[in-house]
Amino acid sequence: MVHAPEADLAPGDHLIAIPWQGRQRSAVLHVPTVARRPLPLVVALHGGGGTALHAREATRFSEKADEAGFTVVYPNATRPDESRPPRFLRNPPMWADGAGRGHTRGAAIDDVGFIGALVDDLRRAGLADQRRVYITGFSNGAAMALRAAVERPGRFAAVAAVAGTLWIEPHAPPAPPTPLLYVTGDRDPLNPVEGGEYRSHWGALERKPPLAELLSRWASWFAAPPPRLSRDTRGIITWRYRGVDGEDVVVARIIENCGHVWPGGRPVLSERLSGPPCDAFDATAAIWSFFEARALAPEER
């Protein structure tokens, strides 16, 4: 295990660790097969009950990183019993996304700080361009990515959330706000587009707000007008909120006949648990396209 990223890490995968809040936190780092440094960085967060390896396999961001030339890091969340291996139901890793699930309820777990410290380590090692750091995640990881973008404005050039929501209520509008791409399926049993109650894999009854509420709140931070809606031949509905300069600041893609999955990726759970798989849309390609068009202005960092 590498305890601090080194600038001369060879292309490929590396297990890295950093001390944080008295724990050794870990992540899988993928260094692309390109020589130029510093590189854009994508932070990809696994869903609840998953691991960094699940995120790597489901999203295939490492393949996109080699193709496009960016670093990708898959951090691991904490789990109830750190002395035992992670298990989806019995020892599930979970991000402290603000929802208060499982072992994160009442615990002083600062995952926003951990992600920031990890990014800083990679930046110092020349593996992250500070103006081109992006964050994304799935489900509980999506909620964590949204929380990090809200609580650390000016750190991420863009955020993408797949099948998650923002659980926290910021004290003040983030300044500057972070451009958002949101992706979800219209048959997701755990992240209903219209909002409402659902039962999690761990038996808890939870209530999620409607997607429109999240999008309108995020767009309000940009003072964006109401969205333009469109539907393509694949049945994909797109909401576009444009800022004062005409650039897309919040974009949502709702995929027809798609469950609680990473669209275009490898399913992690059975269809019985997550709903139908989705091959009509490549979330990884769409997210990277959204990311690569955005960078922080020098004064924002």
Image (tube, helix red, strand yellow):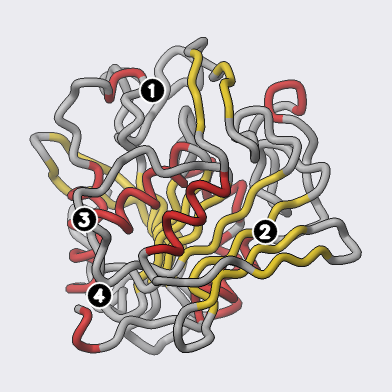
Position above or below: 102 against 78: above
Q: Can residue 297 be seen in the rendering of this structure?
A: yes
Q: Are the residues flagged by discs 4 and 2 in contact, CB closer than 8 Å? A: no
Q: Which residue corresponds to mark 4?
A: 7
Name the quadrant of the C terminus. Answer: bottom left
Can you tell which of label 3 and label 2 is closer to the viewer? Answer: 3
Q: Residues within 10 Å of mark 2 (few under 14, many from 20)?
A: many
Q: Residues within 10 Å of mark 3 (few under 14, many from 20)?
A: few
Position above or below: 160 against 143: below
Q: CA distance from mark 3 to mark 4?
A: 37 Å
Tell me what residue is drawn at x 48 percent, y 64 percent.
180
Q: Which residue corresponds to mark 3?
A: 172
Q: Which residue corresponds to mark 2?
A: 253
Mark 4: amino acid: Ala
- Name the element at disc 3: loop
Mark 3: amino acid: Ala
- Name the element at disc 4: loop
Q: Which residue corresponds to mark 1?
A: 85
- Across and down, in percent, residue 196 comes to 58, 26
